[in-house]
Image (cartoon, rainbow, N blue to C red):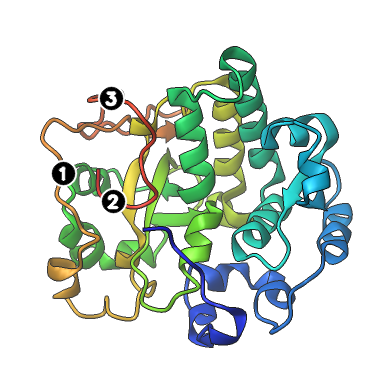
Amino acid sequence: MRFVAPARSEIDPVVFSRPPLSQWLQFRDFICDRGWPDLDALNACARAAGAGSPHFVAQSPELLADGLHYEQRIALRGEVATREHNWHDLLNALVWLRFAPLKSALNARQVAQIAMVGPKSRTRAQCALTLFDEAGVIVLLRDPALLGLWDAHDWHGLFWRERSAWNNGRVEAIVFGHALLEHALKRRQLLVGKALVVATPQSIDVEHAASAHGRPAIKAVVAGVVGGELLRDPQELRPLPMSGIPGWHEDNADESFYRNAPCFCPVRAGRHYPVPLSLGREAPFRAGGTRAANRSSGCAGLQGGS
């Protein structure tokens, strides 16, 4: 079923008090006010952000008559077709404002794939790129013991027994996907992201590694996307039930939540995940992860535990 975001007047303000939306309050005027921002305001922020930020243009029949694919228009003209009074497109614009280098890297890969197969076909790489763009999470991981729990889909262990890890810097989630932010507008929504993991060595200070929304990790992911080492297949992405992160859902202070909530799916037989991207000179963590296996045709959905 297609998700329909609540109207601005119907949004419970409490959703802005917890992650992931609480992490986006630098754009408070755009997301918390009762009125919709216009494109001029978004473009003013884009100009202030400097190089790499695109121009947001109204998606209209006249614009679409140019015959360009959405991604091609961004690459050729620097124009992001944006539906006005639309949460999905507004949040996409805010991700551009915060993570322009990564959005640009995804766009360049998409355009290269379109050049290979045409605008009406989709490759496995395009599915992976789109899935990460919509539902992506970058996870900074300093404690290799946590990876084994994640590999096994031991959600009780990862989120409850290791609850302190999410508060003391041993693991941190940075939400990138604008569809995830849109889903978070609905109170009590169960969120499942699709994660790339960056292993942050113990030698790198936690505060430094996580500063400016994980800038070193973001740069590493950008380099991996640009070079084609990342997001070649949707199966590279790990499901992360973000509602299990302490404080990210109002019910997860109760241990029974991790036993009963439908977002916590068991691992599928034979499912394996890639080893994390390594940040620094140390070898990457290896806790049973391998290159993506069990590849199937088609694009994966935004939510689920596969």
Q: Looking at numbered disc 1 in the image, what kind of residue is underneath it?
A: Val
Tell me if I can see residue 87 in this picture.
yes
Mark 1: few/some/many CA within 10 Å (<14, 14-19, 20+): some
**Point 64% across, 40% down: residue:** 102
Is 24 drawn above or below residue 170 in the view shown? below
Q: Distance between the residues labelled 1 and 2?
A: 11 Å
Left-right relation of 146 to 49? left
**Circle 3 SS class:** loop
Task: Give the amino acid type for the residue marked by disc 2 in the picture.
Answer: Gly
* Mark 1, secondary structure of its residue: loop
Q: Where is residue 165 in the image (x, y as percent from the top left)?
A: 32, 61
Residue corresponding to mark 3: 295
Q: How many labels does the image show?
A: 3
Compared with 150, 178 (above or below) is below
> Residue at horizontal 55%, vertical 73%?
22
| Residue 232 visible in the snapshot | no
Which residue corresponds to mark 2? Answer: 304
Mark 3 and mark 1 residues within 8 Å of each other at the beta carbon: no
> Where on the picture, by quarter, is residue 37?
bottom right
Q: Mark 1 points at which residue?
A: 267
